[in-house]
Amino acid sequence: MAAPRWVLAIDIGTASARAVLFERDGTIAAEAERDLAQHHPKEGWVEYRAEEIWSACEDALLDCLGEIGALPREIAALGIACQRETVVLWNRATGRTLGPAPGWQDRRTAARCAELASQAALIEAKTGLPLDPSNPATKLAWLLDNTDGARAAAERGELAGGTVDSFLLWRLTRGRLHATSPANAARTQLFDIQTQRWDEALLALFGIPAGLLPEIMDCDADFGMTDESVLGAPVAIRCLIGDQQAAAIGQACLEPGMLKATFGTGAFLLLNIGTNLRRSRHHLPTSIAWRLRGETVYALEGAMLNAGTGVHWLMETLRLFDAPEQTAMLAATADPAPVYFVPAFNGLGAPYWDAEARGAILGLTRTTGPAELVRAALQAACYRTRDVLEALAEDGGQMASVLRVDGGLAGNDWAMQFLADILGLPVERPVVTATAALGVAWIAGSSVGFYPGLDRPDAIWRRDRLFEPRLDAAERDRLYAGWQDAVRRVRSA
């Protein structure tokens, strides 16, 4: 039999499902992407249809292989990276999904979180996560209580539930395995990140039957084979991990103190803090970055709920431009007078944790036009990045001397230069910006000997461009002070 030629990555994000085939040198051989529809039945509700996620994933897989005529036997392994807080409920016997799949931006359980406020310190001590409706625990309980017959069926052991990775694994194996990894379990608010088990006290507190949840396995475990009906022949599944942790691996942030930022719908900073668990005084989530061959690496994270959202709002709602690629040119032509756009469409995430804050545009004058608004939207993602970096710095510990970036906004040269300027920190952009897909492929491939291990980052990661700070410190601080004043104005208290 011929030697395998590729590793296949599945990357389920907020807006799309992507399948990517990687060569031995880490370059992309083929890729395909399908959009994911978000549904907004009520104010603050953001949900998916799990069947649509599966269909998009399946179509992307087949399109990706079909692009170059790749055969399943030529694939060494596949892995799954996914958005971590979307939850799915399904019937074990039929595989049929029940109810919607509330996404990470969903706020429907804000009232329930308020009821649990007296338990917030306990929850954060066990899970590393501040009590917030974005986390799956309250959303999974909501599904059980608001889907006809679901709670009784779950108590009888008839249902399975979990994050998107466990749902896709179930579908790929046709129900032979219900599993997840510590990297995804750690984001549910039901998992003790020290004992690395589903926590009985948290399950009782949130009202989640233990039998509903998946088995916990290392991120690089043997997750079985895809069913022959999926791709036409079985393929080994060798990685489950969250998209942000996968991006950190794809960025080769493998040593304590290394830092990456992913800019998509939201923006996510992840700081590798090594094998010793450390907490944030600013309630930045402490997560399991990955557990490989039994060794756990931890991370501090900062989630900004809106990054690309502001740009897309200007494009899709106000129709100020036709494509995101136009934003760099528009920003470069803007009048120098500062305009601040705080895109708190559904609150402010780290380090403010203000779910009731709402967006605003400040500093408007008669000369403010599309260019100024676009520049303000791009700058907002950069200012929010500094908000989180300042919190991380105040938390102490080893910090990076450079920020590695990926995601859609990373391709915008104007925005990345401003990011370096406002942070006073060099910014590195890699050749392969699909870093979540690259990271999951790296783990899956190294687990079967296709790639070298994570001790050889030079084998996969390569820099495309370095952005050095150009702005003097006084101007940097003046602009950031204006941003801080704008944030104060939109805070709910």
Image (tube, rainbow, N blue to C red):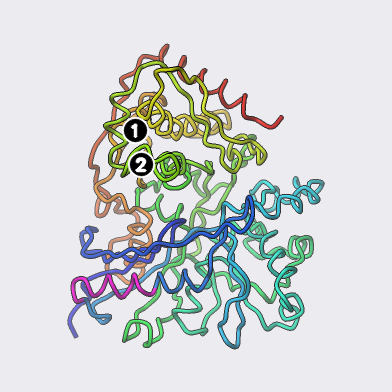
The residue under label 2 is 409
Residue 303 in sight here: no
Residue drawn at the location 56% of the way across and 47% of the way down: 276
Left or right, 197 with respect to 250, comes to right
Residue drawn at the location 52% of the way across and 41% of the way down: 304
- Look at the image and say whether residue 67 sits in the magenta stretch: yes
The residue under label 1 is 415
- Look at the image and say whether residue 10 sits in the magenta stretch: no
Q: Quadrant of the N terminus?
A: bottom left
Residue drawn at the location 58% of the way across and 27% of the way down: 487
The reply to whether dot 2 and dot 1 touch (C-beta < 8 Å) is yes
Q: Quadrant of residue 402?
A: top left
How many numbered marks, from 0 up? 2
Question: Which span is picked out in magenta?
Answer: 58-69
Q: CA distance from mark 2 to mark 1?
A: 7 Å
- Our reading of the magenta stretch's main secondary structure is helix
**Above or below, comparing residue 38 to residue 332 in the picture:** below
- Is the residue marked by circle 1 packed among few (<14), some (14-19), or many (20+) residues within 10 Å? many
**Above or below, comparing residue 135 to residue 237 in the picture:** above
**Three-letter code, disc 1:** Ala
**Above or below, comparing residue 197 to residue 472 in the picture:** below
- Is the residue marked by circle 2 packed among few (<14), some (14-19), or many (20+) residues within 10 Å? many
Q: Earlier in the sequence, mark 2 or mark 1?
A: 2
**Three-letter code, disc 2:** Leu
Q: Quadrant of residue 189?
A: bottom right
Q: Position of residue 271 (x, y in %)?
A: 48, 42
Question: Is disc 1 placed on a helix, strand or loop?
Answer: helix
Q: Position of residue 232 (x, y in %)?
A: 31, 86
